[in-house]
Amino acid sequence: MIDKLEKMTAGLKVDYYDIRYETKQVQRVQMNKKEIRICDANTGDGYVLRVLHKGALASVTFTRPEQAEAAIKKAVENAEILAANGATPKQPAPAPVVIDTIKAGLIEDPRNISLAEKKELTQAYSDLLFAQPKIANVDITYADVYRNKFFLNSEGSKINEELVTTMLYGGITAQDGALTQPVRLSFGGSDGFQRVRNREQDALKQAKIAADLLKAEPVKAGTYKMILNPSMTGVFTHEAFGHFSEADIVRDLPSVRDKMKLGTKLGVDELNIIDDATIPNQLGYYRYDDEGVAVRKVNLMTNGVLTGRLHDRFTAAEMGEAISGHSIAEDFCYAPIVRMGCIFIQPGQYSLEELLAALEDGLYIGDPMGGQTTGENFTFGAQYGYIVKNGKLAGMIRDINLVGNLYKTLLSVSMIGKDFELKEVGGCGKGQTNIRSCHGGPHVLVNELTVGGK
């Protein structure tokens, strides 16, 4: 395929170009109310061409090789229009020339599992969950996504990388009379089908949480000292902090640019935040981004000080900072944008028991349930939580919404757990959907967060 891309772009005279061809295969089974709603397999492919011409960057997508000549012409024309209308001149930061082939590291390849077996597995989880007390509905989806990407640029890089994602996710609803309580479940990863096998105990744990919530008390609104579990820690890190570490957002939002200057002290001394997509087997793993740059570990915050940012080649050149390999596209329909890979708070030194003892009286907050950010302020829902009294979990609580400010919360962290957990099924909707966006961390004790409730 690389040879075909070379022939397509032969004679293209611009400052810089890259072209990506990708095939994408998706198999999916979805069940709701014990019925199979979707059971299908889809395949697609396409090309994304980017050209840098007269200082302007333009991209075009197309689906058939015979469209290449027209796509090239259109991309060059678009770049000329952008340049003529005052687009800020761009240039890519220097990057090594790479020639490499990366096969997906799979323990059990989902492509070798029949769609019938995937349907049986999904139905088995659905039946198991429906058999539990108080469970009124189960909406559950199995999916695997195989991407085979071929990349070529005018500098001589030639890369072929496979990415395979396997996931099983959905919602469990418990009901008692008019009261309903939803809880999510999700498991999967980037290293094979075995990630969704033999996870019955994980599914049953979520069903029990849903049923227990029917007896839980609504949380009382107020400001609390609280412990965030690893999943909630990860969502806070990704949504409230991580997007402000993406260089295109920093570039485009003056208020963020002023506050997120490298070298600024924003967090407590114990706080270290990292993006590391090079960790093997976790959801966000990849070797090269969609600009052909090797991804690297980035220390975003070190001892509370901003020390790094996530870049594509163009933001790196504009800001005079090092490339990081964080330019990612959803698939062959999109040009890449700056994205997190695998972001987390680095574990500390305390056990959960020590965090609870230090908390004394407050709240323990469980897994996230949606949320949003508005600038530096955030609101996150939680699926469940517990009142903590004298360092012990007491009554369960529900209807939890955390409300806070990023900068105040970074300074409110007081203790960081030594445990560590990364999300198995991801998703980030910044401009495009990135199903491999991974986040996580340890338990974290926060001195002050506001809870909206009754």
Image (spheres, rainbow, N blue to C red):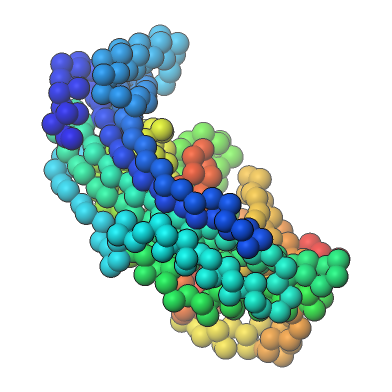
Question: Seen in the image, is 251 located left or right of residue 73?
Answer: right
Q: Is residue 121 above or below residue 417?
A: above
Query: Where's residue 26, x and y in %?
Result: 40, 48
Who's the residue at 42% across and 60% down the image?
116
Query: Where's residue 28, x and y in %?
Result: 47, 52
In depth, the one of 83 and 262 nearer the eye is: 83
Who's the residue at 66% across and 78% down the image?
132
Q: Is residue 365 above or below residue 16?
A: below
Please tell me in which quadrant of the rendered image residue 334 appears: top left
The answer to whether residue 9 shows anywhere in this view is yes
Please tell me in which quadrant of the rendered image residue 2 appears: top left
Question: Seen in the image, is 159 located left or right of residue 127?
Answer: left
Q: Is residue 67 above or below residue 378?
A: above
In the picture, the quarter occupied by the N terminus is: top left
In the picture, the quarter occupied by the C terminus is: bottom right
Who's the residue at 58% across and 68% down the image?
126
Q: How many badges with numbers are in the image?
A: 0
The answer to whether residue 230 shows anywhere in this view is no
Query: Where's residue 243, x and y in %?
Result: 51, 48
In depth, the one of 10 and 136 nearer the eye is: 136
Question: Seen in the image, is 50 located left or right of residue 269?
Answer: left
Query: Where's residue 188, x and y in %?
Result: 44, 64
Please tell me in which quadrant of the rendered image residue 79 appears: top left
